[in-house]
Amino acid sequence: MAEQNILTYLPVLPSGELVGSAAELLGAAAQLGTPVGVIVTSPGAAEDAARAAGELGAAAVYVAEHEAVGTTLTEPAVNVFSTVWETTQPEALLVPNDIDGRDLAARLSVRTRSPIASDAVGVHRDEEGIVAHHSVYGSAFTTESATTHGALIITLREGAVDHRGQAVTPQIHRVELGELTGPAAAITGFEASVEASTRPDLRGAATVVSGGRGLGSAEGFALAEQLADALGAGLGASRAAVDAGYAPHSLQVGQTGVTVAPDLYIALGISGAVQHLAGMQTAKTVVAINKDPEAPIFDIADLGIVGDAFEVVPQLIETLQARNS
Amino acid sequence: MKIAVLVKEVPDSYGERRLNLTTGLADREASDKVLDEITSRAVEAAVSHAESADGVEVALVSMGPESAEATLRKTLAMGADSAHHVLDSALAGADMTLTAEVLAGVLQRIGCDLVIAGDVSSDGTGGVIPTMVAERMGAAHATSLDTLSITDSTVAGERAAYGGTVTVEAQLPAVVSVTERLPDARFPGFKGIMAAKKKPLETYTLADLGIDAEADVPRSIMLSVTESPARTAGEKITDEGDAGKRLAEYLTEKKLV
């Protein structure tokens, strides 16, 4: 039996590069069937992006380029996916669990009458079809879901899938954007992010260093940045630190922020509110440094240090640097 | 102008939350039921607009078990005008396809110009219901807005995009969802609580909405549920001036650096 087509939504950055989630989307698709990439972008970027998708394992890539992508929200992508859906008759569609991915999944779910498996952290196939894995209530429970029949749309949690596809030279198919008929919001402005951080993305980083309210100030939060840079780690923050203005919202780890599952998680001055634990408690190793010996973070830490992060961390960095030199 | 707010009652994420290991459904006894925090920001956005403009009515819409009625009453105290509760035992364990159908059904029945919801719920973490509802209503969507401005005919705001931030604007009718960056909700005063007792709260069944939960359409089903082993505390040391060195040793030994 021929392998089933697994569609993936591969968003493109303004620079023309594929968004980082492409590797894990195509990796997850390769676990299920034939990975097929779909790229919907403003004119000019598609060819390079399609080749990059091939390197990540896309056997075929459907590309559509149109000015409307920059001026109309979601609808151009929905339009192209509807066409590709007809052509490829996919068994599943994988999208990143981010804002644009969710909007696309939602519209297509209703249009194609396909259920959604949301915020999946993994996928596999059994004899009856595709199964999505979920991590529920801040990783306290794991569940598996499937569709009763028909295709399944999966929003994949960023940074959750390690499997990667094999590089191939993809078949590239051009798709024309059809007439946009549905109601849609207009995109009236775009402001590029000020600076691209050189740190690894929080979601996929092998090591994450997070700072909390205990660091005392925005200046104090620089301690977490220094350690992150010394370890080549992603940088995170507790909600309390974000609310206090020490760190931007995009760094928030927890129930209402990013969920991470790194090999090593180092918490500096984080008390360990249940909402924070919900975002990091599947880390393989947790190290916590906190002045308060009663801080709940110690209940889940593999190594807990009762002490002042401003003394422990500089000594740690110094010791590691001395060892490496 | 009528604004509808999608209200979700959730198990309190500040306490323990459990799934029933047999049914896979939320264990209602295990947790306190509260208004989802992100819902309260959506309500605040609607009520503050109603206070600043003439002729704006705010309706709350929720699908949930009996307990959701108390949550709706509390939410009315924040200044909404009416509440609409879909309550039907056939909805226990409803997937998102059915949930969106039900919410769109009740929204179309009461009629509204703008729907405001939280971006992602704290229990299901799906984040797709608002746009699914928009698709069913034939309305535009503008989700995960970090800022929100409403006029008589439009809704606009900023949201994160790949490599930056976009400003989006939709003609009404539209469905929007808001993020944590919108202002937190007000605390309902005594006057609000007293007034809420007299506000209309209507209950609907699936039959009222003409929806069949057993219809033969593709549904998401849960195959298994497992409780993760609880994390336990490891070693705890007190810094005596050498903890940085000991940590370096620990990380090196475990090959983590």
Image (cartoon, coloured by chain):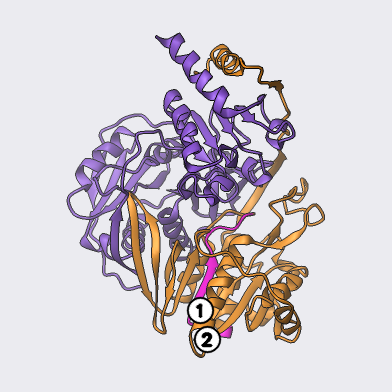
Q: Which chain is orange?
A: B
Question: Which residues, given as a range, are shown in magenta?
Answer: B109-122
Label 2: element kind: loop
Residue at coordinates 47% horizontally, 72% vertically from top-left? B175
Residue at coordinates 64% horizontally, 40% vertically from top-left? A277
Whether A134 is among the magenta residues is no
Whether B118 is among the magenta residues is yes
| Foreground tag (1 vs 2) | 1
Q: Residues within 10 Å of mark 1 (few under 14, many from 20)?
A: some
Quadrant of residue A226 within the rendered picture = top left
Q: Is residue A131 left or right of residue A95?
A: right
Residue at coordinates 73% horizontally, 76% vertically from top-left? B73
**Which residue is tagged 1?**
B49
* Marks 1 and 2 belong to one chain: yes
Q: Which mark is residue A115?
A: none
**Which residue is tagged 2?**
B56
Residue at coordinates 65% horizontally, 72% vertically from top-left? B62
Q: Identify the colour of chain A in the image.
A: purple
